[in-house]
């Protein structure tokens, strides 16, 4: 057995031994073979290992029983492979011979084909030579024919030229222009034919004679026109005994001029148009009264009459393609523009907006009439004439140009653009008057029930006026005047925001104003000090009251908000329309972002006022919550009175705001968001001040449960806040719901932490981190204060908390806050007393006024604490002030008794407001 195994191993080693005849294929060849010859035989694998294959066949000694059968099967496979290889080798033996035979046959075919091609080429060359021999005589005959024809034509032209020159001279002397047209055209064309023979002297002389004839005709016809249309010419003759030509002869003369050089026609028309407008120049000279703007329509009436008279008398003289009437009109427009420019420059102080608009309207109507009457072909001619300076149509015109009135637009009206600042100033004055009217309207509150809208009507009136001005200015000019008009729009948008919207926003007297009013009672009438002191005392008692907006004030704030929203949207549309109408050069300069920011600020201010009003209504309830003896509660009942008071405040205020912001749903949602973001942190701060620990140091579970019930009820009320008091139960926005659930759940977790026993400390710390994962050191200390934990024990608990919750980021100066004096509760209590409402019916001052800066647009103070001066400081400052200014009316000092009364007042105030 061992011997056989050794033999197999030796055979295997022999098979693995590298030989020189082994074939190595590349990877690509191997992949190609695998695709063609797909097999599962392990021997076909490129990484075939004989040892592993034999061990796979004979894994153990028992499997060696079938070794003979395996060897026999392998030998059969080897024999089969040898037979296949032998057949393939024999099949490739004759391949080389077959290929050689095919190559030889192809070479023979190519040789035969080449011989055929050479034969065809030879035959084609012989055929071409034969054709050339046959057609050689025909080509000579064709050349002779062409030369003969050209000679005959040239001789005929020469005969026409010589005879034509003689006949034209005779016709010119007789002024027979009707008979001149045809021979003149023929001679002109023949003369062009002889330009190539100008080196021949006789031909050169003939060409010069033709040119002289054209010059003579031009000069003679021009003189005939001047004689015919000159006012000094007579019907019989003139000094040269030349008979005046009739209209028919003048018409023939015009046809002759059309054949001559175009410069002749241009010079004749220049003289004729100037002669036609000579009367206009003298009649409307700048020193004439009729030349001023108030009689500008007489200018246009003169042209209408003159054109009708001209076309009636001389319309048949000039060819239609000369467009003489249109040329007269174009020159009239140029002269009128220059005259108006000069006279307006000299009398600019006499121009007012009515006169200017009158002249512009008349001019635009006249230009529109001209555009309908004429085709405008002469406007497209770029002429260098100093008299006729017509502006061609600009193919690269501004795409933002105003709607085209016609082809003659601004041919005259361009002279008014330099004075459009008068129009802009007039618009400024009109808007100033309109703004004063709006301010007067704003002094009366908007009656929403009657108007059925919460948007001020004045805002719509303002933008309607803006639209009319923009349309009118666009007809006048869309360049600098339009830009200046946009600046005027921006100016009065800011004025409307400040003088109307901000003026209409209800405001509350601040506490400082209340103190000033109280102090005036002391200094105004010192003779009756007791009465004045009593009034001051009464005002100071009201100082802690919560001042609220009335229902009408809330509606007014909502109206201001919706009007600002309408203005904001319309200003954006106005800006887009102005950029669409104004010239491209000014479009990039136009920006109304500052005006939009003003309206954004007004909207934010209104929302903040609404939030502070609703928040102020909740302050008394939160103060009553902090005064409840939670450690003395013996049973858990329904929700507490302070929760009912808060819900009542919600039901009273929120529906009014929601109904008046029905068209501004997004801002109502923003109002709800801001309110809960301000109210819930304040509620949590009050919650920290609630004492829930009994005298023996244990928690009052019933008090905690009651507070937890109240917090949950308040959470439900806040979730229903957007739809409270509404007949339609609309689901609150998801973002709002998430904020309420997150923050109020935190308040519930604080109460649950308070309910947890401090002992053992490790379990308490773990419970705190479990319920409040993001708690800070300051919040943790407040919870310990709620549980009445001693300061010494707090140090140990906080040290354990810091080690357990090392991931908490906000640690701050927690240790220093613990070791400091325990005046924190007093300061928090002092700050909270600013919101106490002792007398709800007396509202002379508002704590909200301490937190809102009216000049800054109603920016609220930070939620974390009130930054205003505590009330106790106000009292002491009043006592110090009144103690040093006590005099009678006659100037005598009354310091003894008066100072005693003031001190008595101070003691009463300290007892009333500890």
Image (cartoon, rainbow, N blue to C red):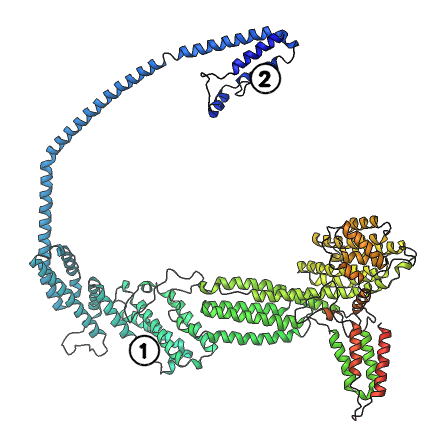
Residue 446: x %, y % from top left? 68, 70
Are there few (<14), some (14-19), or many (20+) residues within 10 Å of tag 1?
some
In which quadrant is the N terminus drawn? top right
Foreground mark, 2 or 1, reads 2
Does residue 30 appear to the left or right of 723 in the view shown? Answer: left
Identity of the residue drawn at 35% across and 75% down: 338
Identity of the residue drawn at 79% across and 93% down: 890
Does residue 833 appear to the left or right of 376 in the view shown? Answer: right
Residue 44: x %, y % from top left? 53, 17
Distance from Cα at disc 2 to Cα at disc 1: 122 Å
From what the image shows, is residue 645 above or below residue 68? below
From what the image shows, is residue 723 above or below residue 474? above
Of 78 and 166, nearer the camera is 78
The earlier-in-sequence mark between 2 and 1 is 2
**Circle 2 SS class:** helix
Identity of the residue drawn at 53% across and 8% down: 75
Of 204 and 678, nearer the camera is 678
Query: How many numbered discs, if any?
Result: 2
Using the image, tell me which numbered label, if any, was put on residue 502.
none
Does residue 813 appear to the left or right of 282 in the view shown? Answer: right
Residue 543 visible in the shown view: no
- The residue pinned by badge 2 equals 52
- The residue pinned by badge 1 equals 281
Residue 447 visible in the shown view: yes
In which quadrant is the C terminus drawn? bottom right
**Circle 1 SS class:** helix
């Amino acid at each position: 057995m061992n011997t056989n195994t050794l033999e197999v191993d030796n055979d295997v080693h022999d098979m693995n031994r590298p030989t020189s005849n082994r074939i190595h294929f590349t990877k690509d060849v191997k992949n190609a073979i695998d695709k063609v010859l797909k097999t599962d035989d392990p021997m076909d694998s490129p990484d075939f290992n004989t040892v592993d294959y034999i061990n796979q066949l004979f894994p153990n000694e028992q499997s060696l029983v079938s070794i003979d059968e395996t060897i026999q099967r392998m030998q059969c496979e080897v024999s089969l492979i040898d037979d296949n290889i032998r057949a393939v080798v024999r099949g490739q033996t004759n391949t080389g011979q077959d290929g050689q035979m095919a190559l030889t046959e192809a070479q023979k075919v190519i040789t035969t084909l080449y011989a055929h091609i050479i034969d065809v080429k030879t035959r084609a060359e012989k055929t071409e030579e034969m054709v050339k021999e046959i057609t050689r005589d025909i080509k000579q005959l064709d050349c002779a024919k062409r030369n003969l024809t050209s000679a005959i034509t040239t001789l005929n032209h020469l005969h026409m030229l010589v005879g034509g020159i003689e006949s034209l001279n005779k016709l010119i002397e007789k002024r027979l222009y009707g008979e001149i047209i045809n021979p003149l055209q023929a001679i002109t064309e023949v003369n062009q034919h002889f330009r190539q023979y100008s080196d021949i002297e006789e031909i050169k002389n003939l060409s010069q004679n033709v040119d002289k004839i054209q010059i003579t005709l031009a000069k003679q016809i021009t003189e005939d026109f001047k004689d015919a249309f000159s006012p000094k010419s007579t019907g019989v003759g003139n000094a040269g005994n030349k008979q005046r030509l009739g209209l028919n002869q003048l018409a023939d003369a015009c046809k002759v001029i059309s054949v001559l050089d175009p410069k002749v026609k241009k010079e004749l028309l220049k003289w004729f148009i100037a002669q036609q407008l000579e009367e206009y120049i003298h009649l409307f000279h700048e020193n004439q009264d009729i030349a001023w703007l108030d009689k500008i329509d007489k200018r246009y009436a003169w042209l209408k009459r003159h054109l009708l008279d001209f076309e009636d008398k001389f319309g048949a003289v000039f060819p239609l393609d000369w467009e003489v009437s249109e040329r007269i009109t174009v020159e009239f427009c140029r002269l009128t523009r220059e005259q108006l420019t000069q006279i307006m420059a000299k009398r600019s102080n006499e121009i007012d907006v009515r006169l200017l608009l009158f002249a512009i309207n008349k001019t635009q109507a006249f230009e529109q009439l001209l555009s309908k009457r004429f085709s405008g072909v002469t406007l497209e001619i770029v002429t260098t004439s100093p008299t006729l300076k017509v502006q061609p149509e600009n193919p690269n015109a501004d795409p933002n140009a105003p709607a085209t009135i016609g082809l003659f637009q601004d041919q005259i009206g361009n002279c008014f653009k330099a004075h459009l600042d008068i129009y802009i100033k007039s618009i400024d004055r009109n808007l100033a008057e309109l703004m004063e009217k709006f301010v007067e309207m704003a002094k009366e509150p908007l009656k929403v029930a009657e108007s059925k809208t919460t948007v001020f009507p004045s805002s719509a009136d303002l933008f309607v006026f803006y639209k009319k001005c923009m349309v009118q200015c666009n007809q006048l000019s869309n360049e600098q005047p339009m830009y200046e008009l946009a600046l005027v729009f921006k100016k009065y948008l800011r004025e409307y925001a400040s003088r109307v919207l901000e003026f209409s926003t209800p405001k509350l007297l601040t506490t400082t104003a209340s103190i000033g009013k109280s102090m005036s009672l002391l200094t105004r009438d010192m003779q009756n000090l007791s009465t004045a002191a009593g009034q001051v005392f009464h005002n100071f008692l009201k100082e802690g009251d919560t001042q609220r907006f009335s229902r009408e004030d809330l509606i007014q704030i909502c109206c201001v908000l919706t009007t600002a929203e309408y203005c904001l949207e319309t200003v954006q549309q106005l800006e887009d329309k102005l950029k669409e109408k104004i010239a491209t050069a000014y479009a990039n300069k136009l920006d109304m972002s500052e005006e939009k920011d003003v309206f954004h600020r007004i909207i934010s201010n209104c929302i903040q006022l609404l939030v502070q009003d609703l928040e102020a209504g909740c302050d008394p309830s939160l103060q009553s919550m902090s005064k409840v003896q939670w450690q003395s509660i013996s049973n858990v009942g329904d929700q507490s009175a302070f929760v009912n008071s808060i819900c009542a405040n919600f039901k009273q205020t929120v529906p009014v705001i929601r109904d008046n912001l029905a068209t501004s749903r997004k801002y109502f949602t923003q109002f709800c968001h801001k309110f809960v973001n301000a109210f819930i942190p304040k509620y949590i701060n009050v919650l920290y001040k609630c004492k829930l620990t009994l005298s023996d140091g244990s928690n009052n579970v019933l008090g905690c449960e009651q507070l937890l019930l109240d917090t949950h009820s308040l959470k439900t009320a806040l979730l229903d806040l957007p739809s409270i008091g509404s007949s339609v139960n609309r689901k609150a926005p998801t973002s709002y719901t998430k904020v309420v659930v997150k923050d109020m759940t935190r308040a519930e977790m604080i109460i649950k932490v308070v309910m947890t026993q401090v002992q053992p400390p490790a379990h308490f710390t773990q419970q705190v981190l479990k319920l409040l994962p993001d708690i800070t050191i300051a919040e943790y200390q407040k919870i310990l204060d709620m549980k009445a934990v001693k300061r010494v024990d707090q140090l140990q608990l906080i040290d354990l908390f810091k080690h357990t919750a090392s991931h908490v980021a906000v640690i701050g100066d927690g240790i220093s806050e613990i070791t400091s004096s325990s005046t924190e509760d007093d300061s928090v209590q002092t700050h909270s007393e600013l919101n106490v409402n002792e007398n709800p019916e007396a509202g002379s001052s508002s704590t909200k006024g301490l937190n809102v800066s009216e000049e800054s647009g109603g920016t609220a103070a930070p939620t974390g604490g009130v930054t205003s001066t505590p009330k106790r400081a106000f009292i002491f400052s009043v006592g110090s002030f009144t103690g040093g200014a006590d005099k009678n009316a006659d100037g005598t000092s009354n310091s003894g008794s008066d100072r005693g009364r003031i001190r008595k007042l101070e003691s009463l105030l300290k007892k009333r407001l500890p």
